[in-house]
Amino acid sequence: AELDTLLQAAEIEVEQVKTAQAAVLKAQNAAEAEAKATPEGGGGALDKDLIKVATGLETSSEEAKKSVAGCMALVEGNVNMMRIRGPTEELKASAAVLQNRAREVKASLEDTLQKVRTAKAGATARVEREARKLAAKQEALRQEKIFKQYDKDGDGLLNEEEIRAYVAGEHKFELAEDKLQNILSKHPDGVAHKDFAQLRSQIAIVWSEILNKRRKEKNEKQMATIKKNSAEILSALSSVEGEVAKAEAQVRILGPMIGASMLDMLSERTEAAESAVDAARDFLAAAKEQALGLGVDSNFETEAKQMALGEAKTLQTKVVALENRVNAAAVLSKAARSKIQLQERKAALLREATAM
């Protein structure tokens, strides 16, 4: 009963969509007739009206789509329920009728909407094509205006000075003499308006060459700077390694002292070791910051960026190795400090016991 009620509502809504399709069909016939009859091939007001009508129908059909989806979900649920409980012949016959109605209403809606989408797609293609043609015409008029602007003597040809002025005014760079003569070799009397597009292409190629040259020069300078900075950081790391070695030498003698409980000497040596470890860490932190910053410049060209990342990775590997050595030295100095503190606590307890 529930499915039957939902189907009745869905059938009414789908029928309303099909009725509304008549307006789309009318607009489609008018737009396609205009497309065949006019040199432009459509893309005007009638096509835009068709798109508007079709879009409106697509929007208004949402409720019908939801109703049909609800019916199909209920049909699927009923089928699953019958599989579980086992249907009677009467129930099977009734369910089959409802399933067929649901499938028919779904197919009817999908067929209607597909026709609407097809009509809309054709109109959209014609409108977009016309827009491209209009844009091309406007660009042609703009280029004609530019040509006349630089054709100072009005002879319909751009001479040497006029070409220079055009490049400087529109493209913002100075055309090299050899490039200019190459252009004029093909147009000794000057560049006519019909060849203006070719001139623009030639200028674009020249500008691209200039940009590539600038990029190459910039890349070479960046790579030279990266090499220089990398060498400086590597030199700094060599100095840091010397500080790390000093710290290692200071902590190396702490082990025997810890075992021998040489408290007075251990205290003095531990302070020296801790100072050496702290100094090594400070030097290493500065070098690490430089190494990490080597490959993060967003203005690097592609080749320079790749080089910087490679150099940074190499330097960071060295930094990590030095960090591990400093940390190992710090562990030994900390152990010595713990031994000293333990001995001091024991001595304090002993003094308290003696005083009592």
Image (tube, helix red, strand yellow):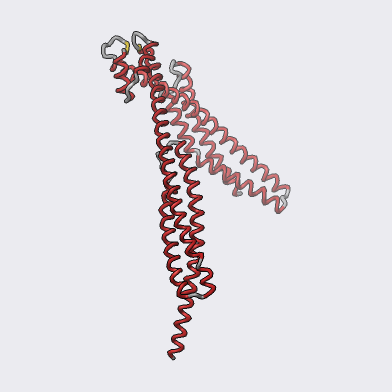
Q: Nearer the viewer, residue 273 or 10?
A: 273
Task: Note whether 147 is above or below 53 in the view shown.
Answer: above
* Screen quadrant of the C terminus: bottom left
Task: Note whether 299 is above or below 157 in the view shown.
Answer: below
Q: Nearer the viewer, residue 141 or 48?
A: 141
Residue drawn 59% across the image and 45% down it:
71
Image coordinates of residue 194 in percent, x first then y, are: 38, 12
Q: Which residue appears farthest toward the bottom when viewing the image?
A: 356
Image coordinates of residue 321 in percent, x first then y, are: 51, 54
Image coordinates of residue 145 in percent, x first then y, are: 31, 18
Q: Nearer the viewer, residue 159 or 74?
A: 159
Q: Which residue appears farthest toward the left when viewing the image?
A: 153
**Can you tell which quarter of the image residue 175 is in?**
top left
Task: Note whether 43 is above or below 194 in the view shown.
Answer: below
Q: Nearer the viewer, residue 300 or 6?
A: 300
Residue drawn 42% across the image and 31% down it:
216
Residue drawn 49% across the image and 29% down it:
120
Image coordinates of residue 207 in percent, x first then y, are: 38, 24
